[in-house]
Image (cartoon, rainbow, N blue to C red):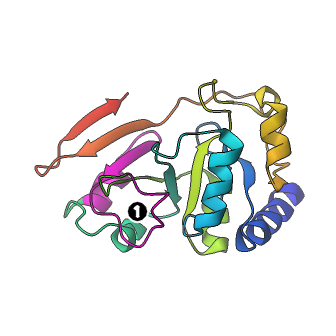
Amino acid sequence: MVDFESDIKNCVSTLQTGGVILYPTDTIWGLGCAAMNEKAVEKIFNIKQRPKEKSLIVLLAEAREVLQYVATPHPDIIAIIEGFKRPTTVIYENALDFPSNVVNKDGSIAIRVTTDPFCKALIKRFRGPIVSTSANISGTPGAPVYKMLQPAIIEGADYVVNYRRDDDTISEPSMLVRIKDDGSMDVLRG
């Protein structure tokens, strides 16, 4: 676990200084930064060569944190999130306090509450939400394992996590859903 702890410390330091990290998530390898740092988010768009109109996903460590970042979540949102059996990203209306380059132009935001031990520890230690977007040049496939990362992505990051570099386990991508007023879900990506 030495790598885990030193990676967490190095990631937190990088996030605090506006840097971009390359890290393993509960789905694939991702590029991340402090979600509230507009300049850091801009760096991610540049590394990925991603159009600015395409919004990003934000990771949180706990379901209750959604209440801090969304104006009108479903009343049962915590129970709904805690009931997910696989990584699930939820699109919420009325995002609160995020920079404009994190929020979709319609005011919505995509948030996933992670169950991954590394991501959870990182977010808790950083004490704030982090951006999570696939670690790839826009329009090319994401990297489920480290050895599939493009050199330009590795070189673009300010810190590259060592933890799980040799893990060849391929996880399924997150579901993408919207929660309706009655608590049912529209599955946008299964």
The percent position of residue 141, horizontal first and vertical second, equals 63, 24
Viewer-proximal residue, 157 or 45?
45
Q: Is residue 185 left or right of residue 134?
A: left
- Element type where label 1 sits in the image: helix
Q: Which residues are magenta?
A: 77-104
Quarter of the N terminus within the rendering = bottom right
Q: Residue at x 27, y 44 (%)?
A: 178
Crowd class of label 1 (few under 14; some 14 to 19; many from 20; radius 10 Å) = some
Q: Residue at x 78, y 66 (%)?
A: 14
Viewer-proximal residue, 131 or 117?
131
The percent position of residue 110, horizontal first and vertical second, equals 41, 50
What type of secondary structure mainly makes up the magenta span? loop
Q: Is residue 119 magenta?
A: no
* Direction right: furthest residue: 2
Amino acid, disc 1: Ala
Residue 50 makes an appearance in the image? yes
Relative to 17, does residue 157 appear above or below in the rendering? above
Q: Residue at x 62, y 47 (%)?
A: 45
Q: Is residue 86 magenta?
A: yes
Q: Residue at x 38, y 74 (%)?
A: 68
Quarter of the C terminus within the rendering = top left
Viewer-proximal residue, 90 or 93?
93
Residue 34 makes an appearance in the image? no
The percent position of residue 69, horizontal first and vertical second, equals 38, 69
Q: Quadrant of residue 3?
A: bottom right
Q: Is residue 159 left or right of residue 36?
A: right
* Direction left: furthest residue: 182
Q: Which residue is mark 1?
A: 63
Viewer-proximal residue, 179 or 102?
102
Q: Quadrant of residue 7?
A: bottom right
The percent position of residue 187, horizontal first and vertical second, equals 29, 33
The total number of labels drawn is: 1
